[in-house]
Amino acid sequence: MDESHVERRLAAILSADVAGYSRLMAEDEAATIATLKGHQAVILPMVEAYGGRIQDTAGDGLLAEFRSVMQAVECAVAIQGTLAGRNAEVPPSRQMRYRIGVNLGDVMYDGERVYGDGLNVAARVQELATAGGVCVTALVRDEVGTRSNMVFEDLGAQRLKNIPRLVRVFRISLDDWGKLESTAHATPRPWLRPLAIWLLTLTLAGVLGLGIWYVVQHWPSSDRPRLSLAVLPFSNLSGDPGQDYFSDGLTEDLTTDLSRIEGALVIARNTMHSYRGKTVDVRQIGRELDVRYILEGSVRRLEKQVRVNVQLIDAETGAHVWAERFERVAEDLFSFQTEVTGRIARALNLQLKEAESQRATRDRPENLEAVDYARQAWAELWNKPPTKETNGQALAYLEKALALDSQVPEIWTNLAYAHSREAAVRWSASRAESLRLAHEAGERAVALDPRSADAHYVLGFTLRLQGDIDRALAENETAVALNPNHAPGHAGIGIAWVMRGRPQEAFPYFEHAFRLSPRDPLRSGWHIWTGIAHMMLEDNRRALEESKRAAAVNPKSTGALTLQAAALALLGREGEAHATLTLRQQMGPPGLTLSLIREGTPSDYPEYHRLMERYYEGLRQAGLPEE
């Protein structure tokens, strides 16, 4: 998203979906689709009549933005009243009833649609509503409650999925509000015009008050968390470049451990790796990444003795907050990392939750040489460009590690990732066999270390390639719950929503992944999926922009060229599309067809395949064969 053209504003967001939609589709797909379209033909004009703007109608969902909180709530209640009448003559087992959530929150508007946390909260509040019911946040209740005779049932503070704060939720008692009589009609009545003007005035006053409150709460700092931190790659002072993987592994572990400090935003490891070996100005890095603190250090490893220097710097002033030197034997590195993390937390006047300190409770592996090989494999997989050669070298290291100790979780995590990559890029003779090995390794990694965000993310990656989208989403959500700063996990959630046929829901997760890791080599793939999501929504210009961003990150990305060819064709630039596809075919692997693309992105969600036809049509126009 080009932030130079983004407007931030307060808005009322209405989110709705059909309760039990999957069951209805499984029982009678044709009838369900017909009923859904009939309901939408009634609901969508109602949204516009109440001053709303439709943002998304993908699948069984509805997302709308209102400038007036009162109109959003009245529209929600009117929709439920209208649908209750339409369902009256339908057998209970075939009734299609909506759940609706309404939230008032800060959103970003780019001239076409809205994005941001306000939408996410509305969607999660909607999930708390019963079929045929409406739930709202406390801000909505406070705005509407004193100006209507609606009855609100307090559901208390709720912990919503992927929302870091507790949200107080209320359920509207529809039966107690005139049986929906006052809002069951979509067209406002003439005598309501003076009342509507009065209510609009009050609403604008309320929104202005909330806006002033928001500015006071956030002035003068940016919207970043109080603890925002980046860990620079530790310098290897051993004199042996072959020890780089060791200092990189130490950096990675500290990044993961610090991510467990409650409320912290820690820039992802892959972005920070781009600074390795460079002379840097910490204040410049602070501005580039919008973080308050920088952790930097050095490692000198001589045989079994390790000396580590660590310093925590205030990126705004350049002042040292804390510095320390540690000397340990290699076997004590686990306790060293716990000690460093705890001291940083205390230096920042924070508490490191014992239950979230994975390093403090993890059993020390019996064979440190196996861990060493696993770290070398990790460096091949995560720190180097993805090639068949680096993937093969990683697998060779992992084979050595397994021969020494098969109980090290990192070995299995890296095995799952390596086999998944060779399946995704078709480096192996059998894609099915690579996915089988990846799945087995991923399950083993999670069983050995259930609190490893990486293990859950990699298992989710494998499951997505196998077409198990629901479980892939759950594994990525678990990764983010374990480590809120896990950028690939956030992107994985976004991809899962795209593959569910709900591209609009994916954008906030992609945006957060880019925020957490703005220099991540993996973001080439994130840009590709963001572009596919835009293409699903028929925004081919944005899809083309994302394909170019993906290619800028990784000029050898075949996926970026494939997306670019489709977008150019759909924009009517068929000559450029043909040339781009020819270049893509020359890069290999050879024999790309539409059937191979479908095989590589399986999903059992019909809406996904329906929306992906726009992508496939672009590729057909560019000249890609079916078989």
Image: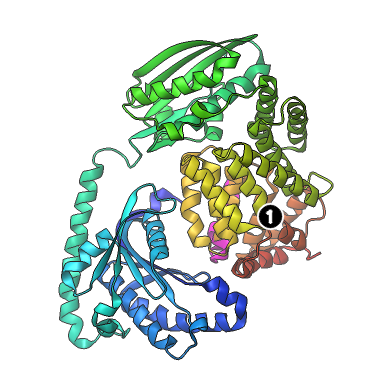
Task: Answer left or right for 483 relative to 523.
Answer: left
254 relative to 57, above or below: above
How many labels were placed on the picture? 1
Q: Is residue 609 visible?
A: yes
Q: Quadrant of residue 530?
A: bottom right
Report which residue position mark 1 lands on. 562
What type of secondary structure mainly makes up the magenta span?
helix
| Residue that sits furthest to the right in the current view | 429
Q: Magenta residues?
A: 534-549
Residue plotted at (39% across, 84% down): 84
Residue 604 shown in magenta: no
Residue plotted at (34% across, 22% down): 347
Residue closer to the observer: 211 or 379: 379
Q: Colour mode? A: rainbow
Residue plotted at (22% across, 54% down): 211
Residue 382 place in picture, x, y as percent: 63, 34
Residue closer to the observer: 231 or 461: 461
Q: Quadrant of the C terminus?
A: bottom right
Q: Amino acid at mark 1?
A: Thr
31 relative to 419, above or below: below
Residue 496 place in picture, x, y as percent: 57, 56
Residue 56 place in picture, x, y as percent: 46, 68
Residue 288 place in picture, x, y as percent: 43, 34
Task: Answer left or right for 333 relative to 555.
Answer: left
Q: Quadrant of residue 149?
A: bottom left
